[in-house]
Amino acid sequence: MKIFEKGLSGLVTVSIPILISGIAIMFLLSPFFLSLEYRRPNFPVDSYGFSTEERLDFGNQTRRYLISKASLDDLRVLKFDSGDPIYIERELSHLEDVKLVLQGMLRFFYGATAVFLLGGSYARVRDWNAEFLRAITRGGRLTAGILAVMLFFTLVSFQSLFTNFHLLFFEGDSWLFYYSDSLIRLFPVRFWQDIFLVFGLITLAGGAVLGWYLPARSKSMLIKEDV
C-alpha cells in the first residue's frame, strides 16, 4: 500500500500542472477571449483589409474547427467576396496539424483529471487527505516554477520561445507563412504574444493558489478548529 500511495502522490503532483494548463487553454479557446482580443484598442489592424467583424467571424469558425469534430471541408467553404478561398491548402494543412497537437494536449488533460479524481476519492475513503494536500501543494509550486520561466522568456525573447515551440510540435517550416496569408492576418504575432502571456499568468496564478495559498488556508482552518 505504501508503494501505491507514493506512486499516487507523485502522479497527483504531476497532474496539477497539466490540469491548470488545460483550464487555461480552454479559456484561450473560448469565444470570449477571441472577442476580447480582437476588440482591444491597441490590437493591430489588418493592413490587407479584414475588419474586426470579419476577423471575429473567420476566427471563431477556425476556433470551432480546432475544438470540434469538424473537418477541413468546413474551412474550405470560407471565401472572400471574390470567391477565392480564405485559406490556401498549406494553411489548412497547418491547421490540421494544430488540431492534432491540441487533441493530444486535451488527452493529457483528461488523463490528469482522472488521476486527480482518483487521488481525491482515495483520500476520502482511506484518510489520506494530508498527503493528498501535500501532493497538490507540490504540484502548484511545480506549476508556478515552470510558468515563471516561461513568462520570463515570453517577456524577454518571445520570438525565440515562439520559434522553439513550433519546432517542437511541427515539422520543418510548415508553420511559416507570409504576412498576406489569412492565418497571419487573423492571428498576427501580437495575438500569439497575448496568448502566451495570458496562458502564463493564468497558470502561474493557479500554481500560486495551490502551492502557497491553499496550504496556508488549510493550516489556518486547523488552528481555528483546535482553538
Image (cartoon, rainbow, N blue to C red):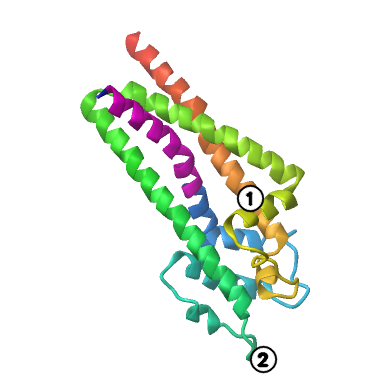
Q: Residues within 10 Å of mark 1 (few under 14, many from 20)?
A: some
**Residue 169 appears in the picture as rendered:** yes
The single residue placed furthest to the right in the displayed view is 47
Is 102 left, or right, of 164 in this rendering?
left
Task: Quadrant for residue 130, please give it.
Answer: top left
Q: Residues within 10 Å of mark 2 (few under 14, many from 20)?
A: few
Query: Which amino acid type is marked by label 1?
Result: Phe
Label 1 sits on residue: 196
Q: Position of residue 79 (x, y in %)?
A: 60, 85
Q: Position of residue 192 (x, y in %)?
A: 66, 57
Q: Which residues are magenta?
A: 2-22
Q: Which mark is residue 82?
A: 2
Q: Write the residue at 39% across / 12% down.
A: 223
Task: Quadrant for residue 90, please give it.
Answer: bottom right
Q: What quarter of the picture does the N terminus occupy?
A: top left
Q: Write the residue at 41% across / 53% down.
A: 107
Secondary element under disc 2, as helix, strand or loop, is loop
Q: Which mark is residue 104?
A: none
Q: Position of residue 89 (x, y in %)?
A: 60, 79
Q: Write the residue at 53% across / 78% down.
A: 75
Secondary element under disc 1, as helix, strand or loop, is helix
The relative height of residue 161 versus residue 7 in the rendered view (above or below) is below
The single residue placed furthest to the left in the displayed view is 125
